[in-house]
Image (cartoon, rainbow, N blue to C red):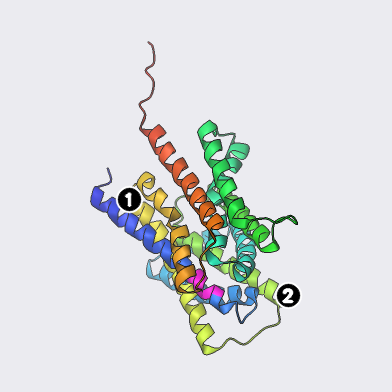
Amino acid sequence: MTSATSNLRGIAAMLFATASFVACDSFMKLVTEALPPFEVLFLRGIAATICCGTLVLALGHGRLVGRCFNKGALLRAFFETASVLCYVVALASMPIADVIAIIQTAPLVLILLVALVWREAVGRWRIAFIAIGFAGALLVAQPTTDGLSSAALLAFASAFGVALRDVVGRGIPSTIPALVVTFSTVVIVMIGAGVMMLLTDEFVMPSPRHALYLLAAGLLVTIGHLGIFMAYRLGAPGVIAPFFYSFAVWAVVAGVLVFHELPNPIALLGIAAIMASGLGIVLFDRRISRMPAPAVQE
C-alpha cells in the first residue's frame, strides 16, 4: 500500500514535471520569435538527446536502448513526432495557455480511441465529461464564421497525435524503462524535425541567448519526462493522475509572467471546462474502482 508521504512526494514530482514541460515550451516559444519552428524543435532535440542519453547511461539503462527501436516503439515515436511538429507550429502562433489547454484534450481522445480499438465500455458519465472537455476546447479555440484558425487546427491535430501515441504505447513491454522509451522517442523527433527543417525552413544562426534557451529547453523536457515517471512510481496512480492537469495552470502563469498575456474570459472558461472534464473522469474512475463487487449467488 502506498503511504501518504509517498503520495505527497508523487504529487510534488508531478507538479514539478508539468512545470518543467511548460518552462520548456516557454523557452521554445521565445526562440520561435526569431527562428523557424522546425529549426527550434531540431536544436532542442539535439540538447534533449544529449541530456536524456546522459541520464539513461547514468542509470545503467544503456544496454536496453536497442530494444526500443522495435515496431511498436517506432510507431509510437512516429505519432509523437507528428504531434510535436504540429504543436511547435501552433505554439509559435497561439498564446501558450491556449495551445496547452487544447492539448489537454488528448486523454479524452484517448478514451474514445480505446473504446473504438479495444471495444472498452465508455459509459454515459465519461461521454458527458468528454463532451464538456471538447466544448471547452472549442471555447479556447474560438472559431469564427470561417472556422477554426490553422494554428488551432494544428493544436487539435497534436492532441490527436498524443492520443494515438498513447494507444500504441500500451503495447510496449513494461520491462523497458520509461526513460529508455523517452530517449528513443527524443531521437526520432529530432530526426523528424531535422527533415522538416531541411524541407521547409531556411536555417537561421541562433544567437548565444537563443542557444542557451534551447539547451535549457532540452534539459527541462528531459526532467519533465523523468518527473512524470517518478511521480507514478512514488504515488498511487489514482492520487497522482489529477495533478497532471496542473499543466493548464502553469501555462496560464507562464503566459502572464513571461509573455504578458492572459486568455480572454471565454478562453479561461474553456480551460476550466477542460480541466473539470479531465478531473471528473479521473475522480469518477477512482470512485468506481472503490465500489465493492456485487455478491455472486452460489
Please tell me which residue is depicted at 42% across the width and 57% down the height of the picture. Answer: 246
Please tell me which residue is depicted at 56% across the width and 49% down the height of the picture. Answer: 136
Image quadrant containing the C terminus: top left
Residue 165, image x and y in percent?
58, 53
Residue extending furthest toward the top:
298
Numbered tag placed on residue 142 in the rendering: none
Image quadrant containing the N terminus: top left
Q: Magenta includes 285?
A: no
Residue 36, image x and y in percent?
65, 77
Left of 268 or right of it: where is 87? right
Dividing the picture into quadrants, the one containing residue 297 is: top left
Disc 2 element: helix
Viewer can see residue 62: no
Classed neighbour count for the residue bearing mark 1: other residues with Cα under 10 Å, few (<14), some (14–19), many (≥20): many
In front: 141, or 179? 141
* Disc 1 target residue: 235
* Disc 2 target residue: 200
Classed neighbour count for the residue bearing mark 2: other residues with Cα under 10 Å, few (<14), some (14–19), many (≥20): few
Compared to residue 113, the image places residue 86 above or below, namely: below
Q: Which residues are magenta?
A: 24-29
